[in-house]
Amino acid sequence: MSLKYLPNRILFQNNKLFNINLFSSIFRQQYHKINIRKRYLATVSSSTSSDLLENIYDIVIVGGGISGSALACALASSSKITGSQKRVAIIESSDTSNIKGWKPIKGEFSNRVSSLTPRSVEFFKGIGVWQNIEEERIKPFKDMQVWDGISDARIKFNNENTGIGPLAWILENYNIHHAILRTLDQYKEDSDVDFLDNTKVQKISFDKENKDEPFDLSDWPCVELSNGKKLKTRLLVGADGINSPVRSFANIDSLGWDYNSHAVVATLHVDSNVENKTAWQRFLPTGPIAMLPLQNGYSSMVWSTTPNLANKIRSMSSNDFVHLVNAAFQLRMADLEYFYSQLGDGESVDFQNEFEWRKDVQSKNSNYKEEFPPIVLGVQEKTRAGFPLRMRNAESYIKERIVLVGDAAHTIHPLAGQGLNQGLADVQCLLKVIEQGIINGQDIGDINLLREYSSERYFANIMMLGVVDKLHKLFGTSLTPIVLARSFGLKVLDNFDPIKAEIMKFAMGAE
Amino acid sequence: MFLKRTITKNVNIMQLFKPKYACIHALTRNTEQSSPEYSTINESEVSKFSQIANEWWSPNGPVKLLHTMNPLRISYIREQLKNKKIGDEVSSSSYHHHHPFRGLRMLDIGCGGGVLTEALVRLGGSVIGVDASDENIKIAKLHAKKDPILHGNLEYQCITAEKLLKQGETFDVVCAMEIIEHVNNPVEFLKACAGLVKPGGGYLFLSTISRTPLSYILTILLAENTFKIVPQGTHDFQKYLRPDELQKIIENIKNDDKWGKVIDITGIGLNPITSKWCKLPDWIPGKFDVNYFLTAQRI
Ligand SMILES: Cc1cc2nc3c(=O)[nH]c(=O)nc-3n(C[C@H](O)[C@H](O)[C@H](O)COP(=O)(O)OP(=O)(O)OC[C@H]3O[C@@H](n4cnc5c(N)ncnc54)[C@H](O)[C@@H]3O)c2cc1C
């Protein structure tokens, strides 16, 4: 920037702002943060409390779950956001020190894992998160088998020889979240993101009395925190999960229903002699049971079932649990029903014996040799946990100066492992839209801009919610005609590669 | 039904599409001798826009189309200014990626509620927005308070281009977007706009609607009458100028010497499916037939 012509270009005599801009462009790196604050301060008459100005943000994200943190990180990674000196805050009610300090322990796995689609992985690579993931705790898989609990009709997806790469990557949520927060920390010098954990959003409102002279921030959301601070923000992002306080504030309804079912998760010890490289899912009439590979010898289970069964599954002895899981994956429905009948407080049979002889009979009588997941040998202590399953979609994802992402916008049945992936696709899209707004000189809280986000994401999410909900309903029945029809469907599909390829692409997040 | 009514109203509809140079030149000569108080402001147009002043920023209001067009206007201006010379300095030397208009003194004529004006400031410009309607200026000032980042680099004035010119102001960039079709005497108005551009490389950005059968159908029959996307009476078809006419007017302007030349004309259109405005690619036959942008540079 040449200095000689600057003075005659200054429009207004009292233009302190201009000098500060010049200053900041020279000393950008070191003085970046101070300057943004100065910039606001410089613009204000001395009568305005500097307290208020300290608490003005361009973007406030409520919720530091994976979606919210990923958004903060994406914003921090973007030269358009940092270059235009946007101030960001992210507020999380829980203490994140356990996430920040997470270190993998050999032979132990967290029970909360997610399968990430190629699209999500690409996104993480783009914003620098993937580089911080603990590599030995990533399990890409190229094989997936899904079958019908009643008819055993099966569909196999195999990306082994297609050269497309893995179908998905299984990671512990801790691994993902840890990497995001670490990456965010690495951007600290060059960005202006305040991460406030252990801080709850207590109230959101519009400050209708204009005390911000010479400004009028009466239509900027004002976020009151548990530490007493009030933040005013140009754009408020709700990444605050299914019971989103931001959504309630915006008066946006969320439509949907609770499935009469719970998901039980657990970390399983499986036969380490088998190469653990396939994701397995069996649709039982009470809901799907899935086994996802973590490492040779370790898998993660997600078993969606009735709340009643879920409670029993969680509280039974580890030993019986292990064989119940084996039965759920390997035995016919009639045999599994027998196991269910033995779940109770009273005396019950030896689950191991029952499983072994029934399996023996089944394999002797059966003339087809289907593949099954590795035999489960044990369960990691304290990893059994249950989650109620719900389906929700917000009536709208945006309002003036407000936008919803992740589970705050939509919650999906985990059977297709898409919930988080959808949230990350939201974040990716929102980043793009905000960047576009900056390039075009728009106010990034402007509803005309935010519409671009909602029109892209609403349709995509509704599609996914619809498909997954239909799958859940389709497989949640034992009615013979439907079982026949869906089994026929699976068999046809299994022999029809072009459609399989399309399904794979959809599930991989290609959209 | 609409078609019938309009046809009977304008008996010889084909006359509407005839070239306008002849009458424009007559007008020019005429007004050269007119009183010094002469203004191109059309009072009824001004009051029309004053009435909707409160609606400038309502997301579904009558000017929604302008909001959706604004990103394209901005990207057009950005693109035209990129790496080009302004005055004796090269704009690329001050070209900051994130504030591409930093260091530029800009004027937005007919700023309305400030839709374009604010965006120019956010991208680094030092901008004056002017409008003939006091109501508009009031709304624009109120709205500007809603964004602290605008503070200090933005000024609004209720003043005409002609008066501003008399005050001897000049600007690196002058924008007169979607305004020519609302003034009384486009030639006089354009002369004032052109005079406000800094000599030696300053830019003039214009956007308007061409006068073609297609633009008549789209902007008057459909947009105003049938679908009511914009308020009825927003446009006066007779005031539309074709790009060749506009170019001729500009290139005929003389200040001592020739004023300058038109360096770009780009046709734009609204994609009805995505409801986004976009530049029309070269292969589209009638790409200049409805809305278009024009860039001219002063010598
Ligand atoms: C059993 C199970 C298995 C799943 N498996 C997969 C899978 O394989 N793949 C996949 O993609 N998805 C999966 N999902 C879905 C996925 O876990 C969720 O979609 C994802 O975690 C949602 O993330 P989020 O950041 O949007 O919301 P959340 O994780 O709910 O985060 C919201 C955050 O907001 C914070 N918050 C809330 N209120 C406030 C407040 N007032 N103040 C401050 N902070 C607040 C909360 O503390 C929380 O940290 C699964 C879900 C379940 C239940």
Image (tube, coloured by chain):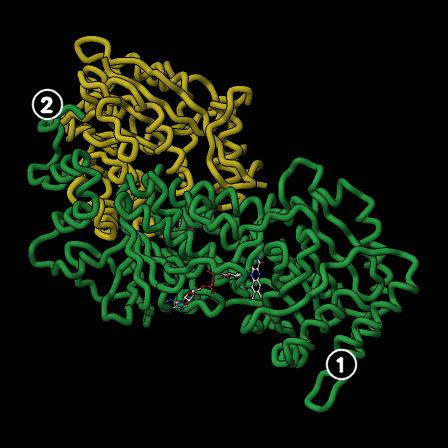
Chain colours: A green, B yellow
Q: How crowded is mark 1: few (under 14 residues within 10 Å), some or many (20 or more)?
A: few
Spatial CA distance of label 1 from label 2 is 90 Å
Residue drawn at x 29%, y 52% as measured from the top left: A193
The N terminus of chain A: image quadrant:
top left
Indicate which label's residue lies in the foreground, 1 or 2: 1
Q: Is residue B233 visible?
A: no
Name which quarter of the figure residue A286 lies in. Answer: bottom right
Q: Can residue A381 be seen in this view?
A: yes
Q: Is residue A226 above or below residue B250?
A: below
Secondary structure of the residue carrying tag 2 is loop
Is A37 on the left or on the right of B239, as rendered? Answer: left
Give percent across and percent down for residue A468. 66, 59
- Residue situated furthest front in the rendering: A273
Is A470 on the left or on the right of A390, as rendered? Answer: right
Residue type for callout 1: Asp
What numbered label is drawn on residue A350? Answer: 1
Q: In this view, does B61 lie above or below A9?
A: below
Residue drawn at x 37%, y 59% as measured from the top left: A100
The front one of B221 and A29 is A29
Residue under label 2, please give it: A4
Residue type for callout 2: Lys
